Amino acid sequence: MAWSGLTARGITPKEVANGNLAGVHYRDIIFHRQCLRLYRDSIQLHQVNELATDVDTDANKLIYSVVNNTDFKFKGHKLKLLKKLDADGRRTSVNLTINVTDNVNSSIHSTPCTSTSTIRIKIENINDNPPVINTESCNKHILQNFTGSLCNISATDVDDIKGAFTFFFTHTYGHFIVDFQTGEVQVGNGNLVANTTYNITVTVSDHGSPPLISMADFSVTIDISNHYPPVFSNSSVTVNIKENSGISFPVYTMTATDRDNGKEGIIKYTIVQGNTDAFSINESTGEIKLKTVLKCDPTEYVLKIKASDQGFDPKSATGTLTIKVENVNDNPVFENTNYGICVNPPLEANLTIAKIIAKDPDYQCTKNNSDTIIKYTLLNHNDILNINRRGEIYTLKNLTHPFHGGEINLTVEIRDYYGGKAYTTLKISPGSNRDPIIRPKVAEINIKENDTGIITKINVTGRGGIITYKIVKSSMVSGFFSINNSTGELSLLRPLDREQYDRVSLIVEAYNQTCNCSCTSQVIIHIENVNDNLPFFIGTPYKISIEEGKSKQCIQKISASDKDVKDKLEITIIPSNWSDHFNLTPSTTNEKCLNLWKEIDAEKIPPEILLGRKIFKMLCEESDKKM
């Protein structure tokens, strides 16, 4: 900070440096009526003879003070500056209120006479701050053949409002040059050495007097030019794997090569589209492995593999791996292997006494008719009993004394379409003619998966007595069904999920308290589907690269599924600005091929698409047919 005009009496540069300003007086200031009065004027920082005068008092006896400003203080008649006034904050002046009193009592004036005035002190700036340099944008990697503008160096200076600077380099040997006025850095002679880092020092000078300078460093690394993209040895591969292939099973290795050397020739592999929940890839080798055990639905997976080199300007290529899942035949299974059946005579011919419930885990893979997938066979007691293709065991003739009053073990074989087998044994106990009679012995009912409440009633006839009911066996966990022990009303306590259970088998007992005897009946509940699950796409999100000028080709297989309704999905395209360029054609069950029907001009694509948004929005939507 400088004070202009400090050449009057008693003011020296040394006093200014010490923070002392001599008693600064206003010229032509007159006090009237024995009171102090200051004329308002501007201090130009030159000394006047008197700051204030009083006809009653010697001017040297006047007492001065500063009002509401801690930067200044009077010491006698000297105005002392207590701290530096910084013009760098764009403050050019200070308004200072001064109070003066004569401190004299007389017979005329019983109190001192005072006066105040505001003066303005101008602040002149000095060049006491060096420039601050910003080289952040210049720390970068460039290719060996790079030419032209590299970056811009900027500077700021709180002393210089206009911000005029001079930029220059030292020891760059012509590799880099800087515009001395703007700070723009350009590559110079172009003789850049690959795999070299240049550490550059820039010096910036302001235009103050005297000028101040600052220095800053930045680095530029020269990378080898990345000439070639990776190339897959086979960019479209189809492999078959069995559905029971275990976790970490090696599916296939996608291999690519790159003719560049160094890191420009090192390849990294990634799965850019497809089911990454089921598959993983080794980023160094391209080996693809299973992350889970696959099922035959869906029967096909499509993965898009990206091979990228590690150059500064990376290049890449994509390949497609189609994985077809082969069904492995699983043996059929019994849904309820703990059968216990009580029959009471007499038994009429063609009376169904039990029903075997079995299923084939491969059903969704074989797609055969549900009535012919499982073949049922009785391996003993074929003279009195038989089993039909629905698994119903029935009597071949009238039986007055079935099984000669003894218990029999009935062996049942089930066989699937591909020859898989399973066996179970039914224990059939003959009752007595005093036992309750339940008809039908096998009751089948249909309910919807969101039903609750009473679903059927067990009917008992003959024999008299007090009958009580209970559920003795169930093919599923308890807590879903209950039976009124007095009326035989069977109730569903909470909804069943069709996606977990398609049917349930119960064994219900009717007990006669009078004769202390009982008999059982089988109740089979079939759960009908309710459309309560949304369809979903498989392998999303879809990210598709389209080559300009290509058309009439399949660019992506779109697969969908629905827990509620298998094989009855519709996949359509949502109308949009670009939808007329695409269409869908059937591929396999619940899958369609998205075809690029018209050529796309890259120059006409909206900028937001070029920045990476999906060109389809997602153009495809899925819907199920409510059955």
Image (spheres, rainbow, N blue to C red):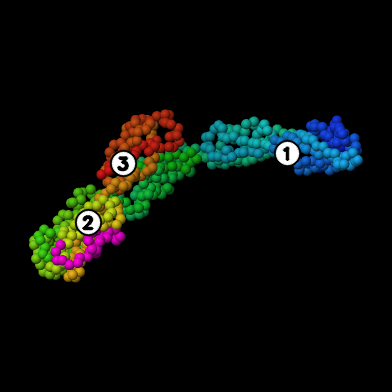
Residue sitting nearer the eye, 79 or 585: 79
Q: What residue did someone put label 1 on?
A: 86
Vertical arrangement, residue 527 with respect to residue 138, above or below: below
In reply to whether residue 470 is colored magenta, the answer given is yes
x then y, percent, for residue 104: 88, 41
Disc 2 is placed on an element classified as strand
Disc 3 is placed on an element classified as strand
Name the mark on residue 297: none
Vertical arrangement, residue 196 with respect to residue 579, above or below: below
Give the mark toward the camera: 2 or 1: 2
Identified at 90% across, 39% down, the residue is 108
Residue sitting nearer the eye, 249 or 611: 611
x then y, percent, for residue 598: 34, 30
Name the mark on residue 456: 2
Q: Residues within 10 Å of mark 2 (few under 14, many from 20)?
A: some
| Chain-order first, disc 2 or disc 1 | 1
How far apart in space, not on screen, are marks 3 and 1 (Cα)? Answer: 73 Å
Give the mark toward the camera: 3 or 1: 3
| Chain-order first, disc 3 or disc 1 | 1
Identified at 47% across, 43% down, the residue is 310
Q: What residue did someone put label 3 on?
A: 623
Q: Please state which amino acid type lies under the numbered disc 2.
A: Thr
x then y, percent, for residue 407: 15, 68
Q: Please state which amino acid type lies under the numbered disc 3.
A: Ser
Q: Please state which amino acid type lies under the numbered disc 1.
A: Asp
- Which segment is the magenta one? 461-490
Disc 1 is placed on an element classified as loop
